[in-house]
Amino acid sequence: MNINPDNSALVEGIISLSKAFNREVIAKGVETTSHGIVLIPIGYDCVQRSVLAKALPHWLKQYKFDPPWRLSRKSTATY
């Protein structure tokens, strides 16, 4: 999205269409905090990181909330 302007236009179009139909916009499969920080301010209501099912127990044990997520949060965003 940050490299190809066509991808950015597609993302913005999806956000606009979703908002026009009063739907929540969720970015799925966000791999890094930096991606989430870019996506939330442009209109996503929340982002979802991907974790493999077999890796979930370990991920839950070691997960620590990443402070930059809080900095990018909109008043309507959910985490």
Image: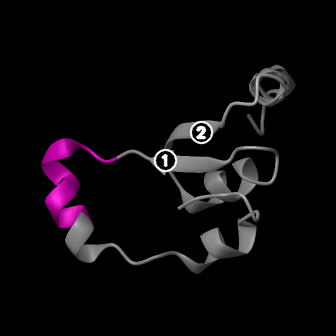
Q: Nearer the viewer, residue 51 or 77?
A: 77
Q: Is residue 68 above or below residue 15?
A: below
* Secondary structure category for the residue under label 1: strand
Span highlighted in magenta in the image = 51-59
Q: Residue pushed farthest front? A: 22
Going from N to C along the chain, the mark reached first, 1 or 2, is 2
Residue 14, image x and y in percent?
75, 23
On screen, residue 35 versus residue 15, left or right, reads left
Which residue was labeled with disc 1?
Answer: 48
- Dominant SS of magenta comes to helix
Residue under the point 39% across and 78% down = 64
Mark 1 and mark 2: Cα distance apart in space = 7 Å
Could you tell me residue 22's position as x and y percent? 75, 30
Q: Is residue 52 above or below residue 16?
A: below
The crowding category of the residue bearing disc 1, from other C-alpha atoms within 10 Å (few below 14, some 14 to 19, many at least 20), is few
Q: Residue at x 85, y 24 (%)?
A: 9
Q: Amino acid at mark 1?
A: Gln
Does residue 47 show up magenta in the picture? no
In the figure, 19 relative to 44: above or below? above
What kind of residue is marked 2? Answer: Ile
Q: Position of residue 26 (x, y in %)?
A: 59, 39
- The spot of residue 48 in percent (x, y) is 49, 47
Position above or below: 18 against 49: above
User: What crowding class fits label 2: few (fewer than 14 Cα within 10 Å), some (14-19), or many (20 or more)?
Assistant: some
Residue at numbered disc 2:
26
Q: Are marks 1 and 2 in contact (CB under 8 Å)?
A: yes
